[in-house]
Amino acid sequence: MATAIRKVYDNVVRSRTVVRDANRFRQIVTVLVRHGLGAFVGRLGIREKWMSGVLRRDGEEAAQAHALPLPKRVLRAIQELGPTFVKLGQILSTRPDLVPPEFVEELKTLQDRVPPFPYEQVRQQIQAQLEKPAEEIFERFDQEALASASIAQVHRARLKTGEEVVVKVQRPGIRAQIEADVEILAFLARQLELNFPETKLFSPLGIVREFEKAITKEIDFRIELDHLERFRRNFEGFEGVRFPAPWKDLTTREVLVMEFMDGIKITGILGRTEYDQRKVVKIGFALVFKMIYEDGFIHADLHPGNLFVMPDSTLGLIDCGLIGILTPRQKDNLSRLIINLVQQDYRGMCRLLWKMGIHHHPSEYFETFEADASQIMQKWFSFKNMSEIDFGAFFKDLVDGALRHQIIMPPDYTMTFKAIVTMEGIAKQLCPDVNLIDEARPHVTRMLADRYSPARLAQEFWEEARHVGQSILSLPEKVGQTLDELRQARARVTVEVAETRRALEAYQLASNRLQLAILEAALLLCGTLTLDYPEPRLFGLPGLPVVFYGLAGFLALGHFLGILRSGGT
C-alpha cells in the first residue's frame, strides 16, 4: 500500500514539474525529435497528450538528421537548446568514464559563445545591482563587449580611481531559464532511469543534481569572488602566476568587477619569440600540481581560453566560477597514484584505481580488473621513454578500462585528470620536449618526503590509536545497552547471569591488554622516531631511544607474564 502511494506521489511531483514549465518542456521535446532523437524520446514513457503529435511530426528535417551520426545529432540538439544544455554538454565532455568516446569528441567542440545583449540592458543590470548608474562608478565603460557567453558577458572599463577593470554582467532572465531547464532535466533523468534500467549504474539523476549544484554556483558571482580570493591567498608569493583582484564592494550576485589582465591566450604565444614558452609551460605544470597536491582547491574549467600569458611570461587565470575541492584522502590517493606512475608500479596503480572507483564488485573480482589494467599499462610503458608517452591517451585508456568493469571514477578525480591532461596538451604544442613525468618528479620527491616523514607517520599512528581507543571505550556502553534490552525482554533470549559476568570479565581483560599493546607500540614508534637525536646519551647510547625502548620492553615483559599467569588467555 505504502509503495503504491509513493508511486502516485512521485508521478504527481513529476507531472507538476512538467506542467509548471510546459512550454519549455514541449520546446525541448520538439528540438530532440527534430534532430532525429524521436525514438529515444518515445521510450521515456512521457504521458502527455501532445507527445504523440510531436512524435508523428518526424518529417523531412528529422529524416535529414537521421543521415548524420548519432553523436553529431546530439551535439546539434544541445546547441539549439541553449545555455543550460551547452553547460551540461561541456561538463559531460570531461567525463569519459560516463560518456562514450565518440560523444566526448563531439561535446568537446561545444562553444559557449552567443551574440551580446544590448548595452542598454547592461546599464540597467549595473544600476539595479550596484544601485548607482554606471557613469557614477566608472570613468570609462566600453559599450562593446570583450566576450559574450550564454550566462554573462564581459566589458572593459576604468574606475573613477583609475584602475583598469573588467565588468562581468549576467544575461537578463538567464537564472529563471536555467532553473526551469534543470527541473526538466531532473524529470527526464528520472524517466531515463525508470525506462532504461541499465543507466542506473551511471545515475543520470545524480549527474543532473551535481550539475545543478555547479551551475547554481556559477550564476552567483559572489561565489566566484570567494574563489578568486582563495586562489589569490593560495598563490601569494608564487612566482609566475596571477589571479585577477576582485572589487568586493562592486560585486553582487549578477555583477562582478575585477582587475583587467593584459595578456593573450596561452596557445597564442606559439612561435612568438617575445614569450619564454618553456618558462610558461613549466609554470603551468607547477600551477596544476600545486592546486592538486598542495591546496586541494582546483580550477575546474581549465582550458586554453582561461589561461592568459602576460608580456613578462606570467600566467594569468580567469573564470573561477567552477572549482573542485579534494579531501585529504583524495589528495593522498592522487599523490600515491602519480608516485606509482613514476615508479611504474602497475600493481600499486591497479589497487589505487580499484580503491578510488565507485563499484559494487566483491574483493575477489580485483584479480580480473588487475589483469586488464596491467595490460593497458604495459602497452603504454613497456620499451618506451617517458617523453614518448601521451598521458592524455593513457588516462583515457585507463578510464575506459575501468568503465568496461563497471567502475566509475568520482567527478573530483576525473576533473583532476582533465587538469593534468589539459596542461600536458598545451605543453606538447608550445614545448614538445618537456614531458609530464620530468615536471612531476620534484613534486613526487616532496610528496614522498611528506608522506613518510616522522611527523606524518606519528600523526597517522596516533589518529588510528585514538580511533581504536574510542571504539574500545564505547564497548561497555554498547554491552550495557544490550543487557538492558535483554532485561526488558526486547530480545527473546535466556541468559545465565554467571555466563554474562564471565563474558564481561573476559571482555574487560581483553580491553585492558589491547590498550597496553597500543601503548607498547606507541613507545616503540617514539623510540624509532628519535633515533636521529643523539643527545642526551645514556650508557653511551642516544638517551631518548633508550628510554622509550626500555619502557616498551618493561611493559611487554609484564604483559607476557600476565598472559602466562592467566593460563595463556
Image: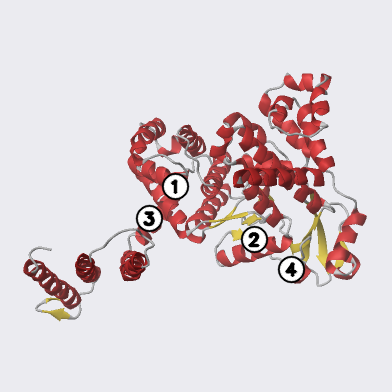
Percent coordinates x, y for residue 512 in the rendering: 22, 71
Disc 1 and disc 2: Cα gap in Å?
Answer: 31 Å
* Type of amino acid at the residue the image marks with label 2: Phe
Residue 364, numbered circle: none
* Type of amino acid at the residue the image marks with label 3: Thr
Disc 1 and disc 3: Cα gap in Å?
Answer: 23 Å
Disc 2 and disc 3: Cα gap in Å?
Answer: 27 Å
* Residue most extreme to the right: 120
Mark 4 element type: loop
In the rendered image, the vertical position of residue 522 relative to residue 364, given as above or below: below
Residue depicted at x 41% and y 50%: 441
Q: How is the image coloured?
A: secondary structure
Residue depicted at x 12% and y 63%: 569
Mark 2 element type: loop
Marks 1, 3: nearer the viewer: 1
Marks 2, 4: nearer the viewer: 4
Residue depicted at x 77% and y 43%: 18
* Type of amino acid at the residue the image marks with label 4: Trp
Percent coordinates x, y for residue 50 in the rendering: 83, 32
In the rendered image, the vertical position of residue 462 relative to residue 110, given as above or below: below
- Disc 2: which residue: 243
Disc 1 and disc 4: Cα gap in Å?
Answer: 39 Å
- Disc 3: which residue: 445
Residue 356, numbered circle: 1
- Tell me the quarter of the picture where residue 349 sits: top left
- Disc 4: which residue: 247
Percent coordinates x, y for residue 260 in the rendering: 74, 60
Marks 3, 4: nearer the viewer: 4
